[in-house]
Image (tube, rainbow, N blue to C red):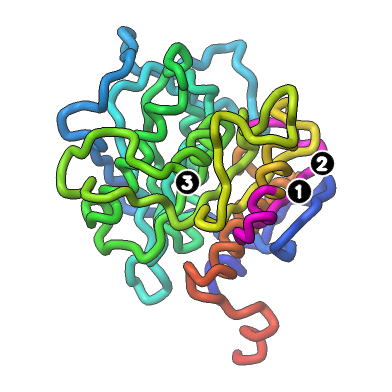
Amino acid sequence: MNRLLEGFLKSVLAGSIVSVGVSVCPHGFADSPDRESVVVLPVWPDGPPDWEAPREEERDTSDASSQLVAGRPLIRLGFVRDVQMHVFEATNDQGDPSRTTIVICPGGGFHILAWDLEGTEVARQFQSAGVTAVVLKYRVPTRAMKPAWTPVVQDIQRAIALIRAGKVTQQVPETVGVLGFSAGGKATVHAATARARQYDAVDQADAKISPPDFAALVYPAWIVQDDAPGELRDAIEIDSQTPPMFLAHADDDPHQVLNSVTLFQKLHAAGVPAALHVFTGSGHGFGARIDGRADDLWPELCVRWIRDRGWLPKQESATQESATQ
């Protein structure tokens, strides 16, 4: 029996879900197996492009007053100067390297990174599903810069370039996507729609601009205009060449759900394949922690969407498997 089917969610699912483009199925991720040590690689050989680097040392900025998520604390990683890729390489059932890699960009308001909640924990789930995950430790804080997302887009573009150049994984993947949360989702949209490289070429890996093959956005922030939520902001342009997108959001998110809904509408109007999932009462920043709510399903829905697009091998259903046993 395959790994995903062995990992049925044990929690009672609550809430409701509106789905466009993907069928809901209550299959969870298998428990993450023991893996070799995560490989950590630098993104910039001689330091990143010019930016206002923090003077303080990188550290977890959480304290006793910090909010918990699903009853657990999280790492709020601040003052990041050294841009890194933390590589969680996956293989298929035959032991071959995954043909799909996803770059994960945690959120944190361009001030910190929700490092485990929206980074390493998510990477383990995608790794267990057969997707190689690269958690991008991008530069923060950048709030004082205008625009704040430019350094992050530079880091994303460079990470994709290195992956496509065969500098990150055992085998060059056929498909490279980006998954962004909140502010990371904002930067992901800009990386997915950029027409040009946002930094000067460093080496041969930067020979040409290489946008992601798809983007996944989980409660993205600052996508629509505050006074016109039916319109995109910051010169985000959607056309027929925009990569396919997966979107997940909560209806009561203070970073309004129209960030995802409007983006989906623009994608749909341009003929770009997209999936939208809206969860009830999940708020903002739920990550991928299991707490018995319907939003527990979004990672599985995302992986199934990746399969539906042909970027991962299809898996037999439970009925098909039992019929062959």
The residue positioned 37% from the left and 27% from the top of the image is: 151
**Which residue lies under the disc numbered 3?**
192
- Is residue 37 visible to the viewer in this orientation of the structure? no
**Image x and y of residue 202, in percent:** 18, 38
Q: Secondary structure at mark 2?
A: loop
The residue positioned 28% from the left and 45% from the top of the image is: 39
Q: Secondary structure at mark 3?
A: helix
**Which residue lies under the disc numbered 2?**
280
Q: Secondary structure at mark 1?
A: helix
**Amino acid marked by disc 1:** Ala
Residue at far top of view: 55
Query: 49 or 70, which is in the foreground?
Result: 49
**Disc assigned to residue 206:** none
- Is residue 174 visible to the viewer in this orientation of the structure? yes
Residue 42, quarter of the rendered image: top left
Say if mark 2 contacts mark 1, CB within 8 Å.
yes
* The C terminus: image quadrant: bottom right
**Amino acid marked by disc 2:** Thr
Separation of residues labelled 3 and 2 (CA atoms): 28 Å
Please state the extent of the stretch shown in magenta in the rendering: 266-286
The residue positioned 17% from the left and 34% from the top of the image is: 45
